[in-house]
């Protein structure tokens, strides 16, 4: 019956979201785990439709998973975020709409009630080749690839953590490594590396904020903000990476997921980057 319902929704062109949330809060364990897996499909089909339109099929997958450790004065928080999306039309064929892999980790040793001496690590890249279809609709030369670029940031600092819903990590001596492993992209100096080099080192100030709360009944909001300024070059140009995730829980099985992502980074683009994803559908929790 469930398979029949999913097929029916897909064929009728309705957005479908399948999500699973798992939380391990075993009092005998030092680990607290929880996450969400979402898969969304969208299909549109036209036959003798006077208003016009083009058949299309789209799919998006998203994972947001936390696994946090707590023992005595020690805290170790980990988060994995992945996303991938594709759309296919007769005119344009298959094109990527989303592609992301990120891992964040912060370890802290308590200094005062809510403050911790900390060390953090953040890694970001993508899974597959990316193309600039806006500049060239028939683009066949990648503008990005797996590990081109990739970003690795780490450094010591101070962590303010009241609970798992609100924390700020300040790292005034952050090392940031930009990796461009592809020969062609490296040769043109993409993503801030010198032409011919496959990496770039920066030293700067990093501040990361995480905040999650229920803003009203059955509506939760998650903010993830990262700010970075390079001491070695253009310190006034602050890189901004902000994610806003809103979940509207209609009932036990229905919800709406809204994601906003903003990036400001001169090494990537001279203009701010914006992305919005909306998914409406079914939820299953366990």
Image (cartoon, rainbow, N blue to C red):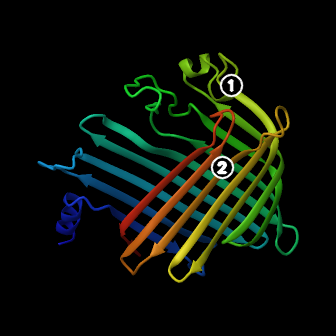
Q: Nearer the viewer, residue 16 or 121?
A: 16
Q: Which mark is residue 110?
A: none
Residue underneath mark 1: 193
What's the residue at 26%, 46% (across, down)?
56
- Viewed as shown, does residue 163 lie left or right of 125? right
Residue 118, quarter of the rendered image: bottom right
Residue 229, quarter of the rendered image: top right
Q: Which residue, as the protein is rendered here, is positioned at the far left?
A: 48
What's the residue at 19%, 58% (across, down)?
11
Q: Which residue, as the protein is rendered here, is positioned at the far front?
A: 50
With respect to residue 90, does 170 lie above or below?
Answer: below
Within-10-Å neighbours for mark 2: few <14, some 14–19, many 20+: some
Q: Nearer the viewer, residue 191 or 63?
A: 191
Instruction: Tell me which label, 2 or 1, sits earlier in the chain.
Output: 1
Look at the image and tell me in which quarter the C terminus lies. Answer: bottom left
What percent of the width, then of the height, locates residue 24? 53, 74
| Circle 2/circle 1 CB separation < 8 Å | no
Q: For the residues marked 2 and 1, what is the alpha-carbon distance in whole angstroms?
A: 20 Å
What's the residue at 85%, 37% (across, down)?
231
Within-10-Å neighbours for mark 1: few <14, some 14–19, many 20+: many
What's the residue at 51%, 40% (across, down)?
126
Residue underneath mark 2: 241
What percent of the width, then of the height, locates residue 248? 47, 73
Q: Nearer the viewer, residue 189 or 1?
A: 189
What percent of the width, then of the height, locates residue 72? 76, 73
With respect to residue 70, does 233 lie above or below?
Answer: above
Q: Which residue, as the protein is rendered here, is positioned at the far right?
A: 112
- Viewed as shown, does residue 159 lie left or right of 37? right
With respect to residue 130, does 212 lie above or below?
Answer: below
């Amino acid at each position: 019956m469930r398979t029949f319902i999913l097929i029916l929704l897909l064929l009728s062109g309705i957005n479908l979201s399948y999500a699973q949330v798992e939380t391990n809060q075993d009092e005998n364990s030092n680990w607290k785990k929880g996450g969400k897996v979402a898969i969304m499909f969208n299909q549109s089909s036209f036959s003798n439709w006077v208003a016009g339109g083009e058949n299309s099929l789209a799919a998006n997958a998203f994972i947001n998973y936390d696994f946090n450790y707590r023992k005595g004065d020690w805290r170790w928080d980990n988060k994995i975020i992945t996303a991938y999306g594709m759309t296919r039309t007769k005119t344009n064929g298959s094109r990527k709409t989303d592609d992301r892999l990120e891992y964040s980790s912060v370890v802290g040793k308590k200094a005062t009630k809510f403050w911790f001496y900390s060390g953090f690590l953040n890694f970001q890249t993508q899974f597959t080749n990316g193309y600039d279809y806006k500049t060239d609709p028939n683009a066949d030369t990648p503008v990005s690839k797996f590990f081109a670029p990739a970003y690795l940031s780490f450094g010591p600092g101070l962590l303010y953590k009241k609970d798992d819903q609100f924390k700020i990590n300040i790292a005034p001596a952050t090392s940031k490594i930009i990796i461009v492993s592809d020969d062609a992209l490296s040769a043109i100096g993409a993503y801030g590396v010198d032409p011919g080099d496959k990496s770039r080192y920066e030293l700067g100030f990093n501040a990361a904020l995480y905040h999650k709360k229920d803003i009203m009944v059955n509506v939760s909001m998650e903010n993830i903000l990262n700010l970075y300024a390079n001491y070695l070059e253009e310190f006034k140009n602050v890189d901004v990476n902000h994610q806003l995730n809103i979940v509207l829980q209609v009932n036990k099985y229905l919800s709406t997921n809204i994601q906003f992502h903003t990036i400001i980074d001169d090494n990537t683009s001279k203009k701010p980057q914006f992305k919005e994803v909306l998914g409406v559908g079914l939820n299953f929790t366990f």
